[in-house]
Image: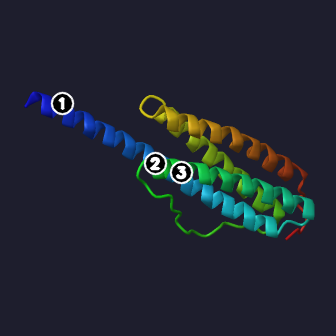
Amino acid sequence: MALTHTVLSWFRRKEREHRTARTLLTDNYRGLAHLARQIKLHADYAPYPFVGERLRQVAAEKEKSLTTLGESIERLGGRATTIDTSVPSGRNHWERLGQDLDDQKQLEGRMVDDAAHLALDAPEHSDLLRQLVAIEKRHEQILADLLAKADPQANQT
């Protein structure tokens, strides 16, 4: 009886760990998908072609990360789905880039926290999130650079 209880407890604990990892990865998937869609939409309204192209590149890289993240979620028995929400917009290009950068920082912070949370129980998923954070840090730098070059006073739609 004690052996059965021990074995069942171990399986239940492992199931909780997977559910936790799956939940965290799914939340990050949704946040990343939302930000990719938001940046892609904002690229369509960029005032200069090179800015729009750079934003599209960032969105495309995020979509590649989504594929990797989605595969991990599926290996855990989950399904990578997004929740369709509205995309925030600003009055001009500068405000949209500011929104993108703020959302980027929030997503990146959540990924760092989740990677730390998963480090002991699911190190492979923690490593995946850390790899994605490295990519996201580059995106943050790109968005910050584009924002620094944008004119907040211009009526750039």
Tell me if 20 is positioned left or right of 61 in this view.
Answer: left
Residue in front for this viewpoint, 36 or 108: 36
The reply to whether callout 2 and callout 3 are in contact (CB within 8 Å) is: yes
Name the residue furthest left: 1
Residue at the (67%, 66%) spot, across then down: 88
Quarter of the picture containing the C terminus is bottom right
Indicate which disc, 1 or 3, sits on the residue closer to the N terminus.
Answer: 1
Q: Mark 2 points at which residue?
A: 75
Identify the residue at horizontal 50%, vertical 58% (top origin). 80
Left or right: 134 with respect to 19? right
The answer to whether mark 1 and mark 3 are in CB contact below 8 A is no
Residue that appears at 65% across and 67% down: 87
Residue 29's mark?
none
Q: Quickly name the residue at label 3.
A: 71
The residues tagged by marks 2 and 3 sit, at their Cα atoms, a distance apart of 6 Å
In front of the other: 155 or 22: 22
Q: Tag 1: residue type?
A: Thr
Out of 65 and 139, give the one closest to the viewer: 65
Q: What residue type is labelled 3?
A: Glu
Q: Is mark 1 on a helix, strand or loop?
A: helix
Does residue 152 show up?
A: no
What residue would you read off at disc 1?
A: 6
